[in-house]
Image (cartoon, helix red, strand yellow):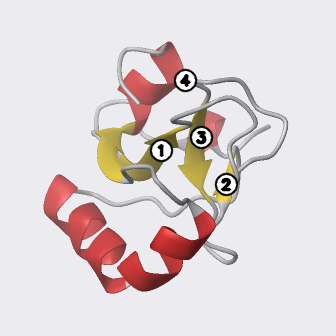
Amino acid sequence: MSDVDTLDGARTWWVPAVTAPMRDWAGMPGCRRGARFLIDEESLRPARDNYPLFENRIDCLQWIMAHRTALVRTAPDANVAPVSLAHWLLGIEG
């Protein structure tokens, strides 16, 4: 069972996400333009797993701001933003 399967569906969870601004983006070499990624909690690099979960948008945004220096380095030229995990999984935002 994945971590997503264990989440309470009645709650909104927030995660830091990023969209590749160009093909073969330095943050994720080999990706296509517009590819969506979450941010790995440990490496602070674009990834699809091991992401931090937050109970509200403000906490997620504070985490992003606290790590902004590293995120500029690991996700260059892209905007890391808090998004609803459910919406991200459905492709509605990200």
Query: Label 3 to label 1, Cα distance in Å?
Result: 5 Å
Label 2 sits on residue: 27
Name which of mark 3 and mark 1 comes first in the sequence. 1
Label 4 sits on residue: 34
Name which of mark 1 and mark 4 comes first in the sequence. 1
Residue at (35% x, 23% y) in the render: 93
Query: Label 4 to label 3, Cα distance in Å?
Result: 10 Å
Name which of mark 2 and mark 1 comes first in the sequence. 1
Label 1 sits on residue: 18
Residue at (80% x, 37% y) in the render: 1
Query: Label 2 to label 1, Cα distance in Å?
Result: 10 Å
Q: Could you tell me the amino acid type at mark 1?
A: Val
Q: Could you tell me the amino acid type at mark 3?
A: Phe
Q: Do the residues bearing badges 3 and 2 touch, measured as CB atoms within 8 Å? A: yes
Q: Could you tell me the amino acid type at mark 4?
A: Gly
Label 3 sits on residue: 37
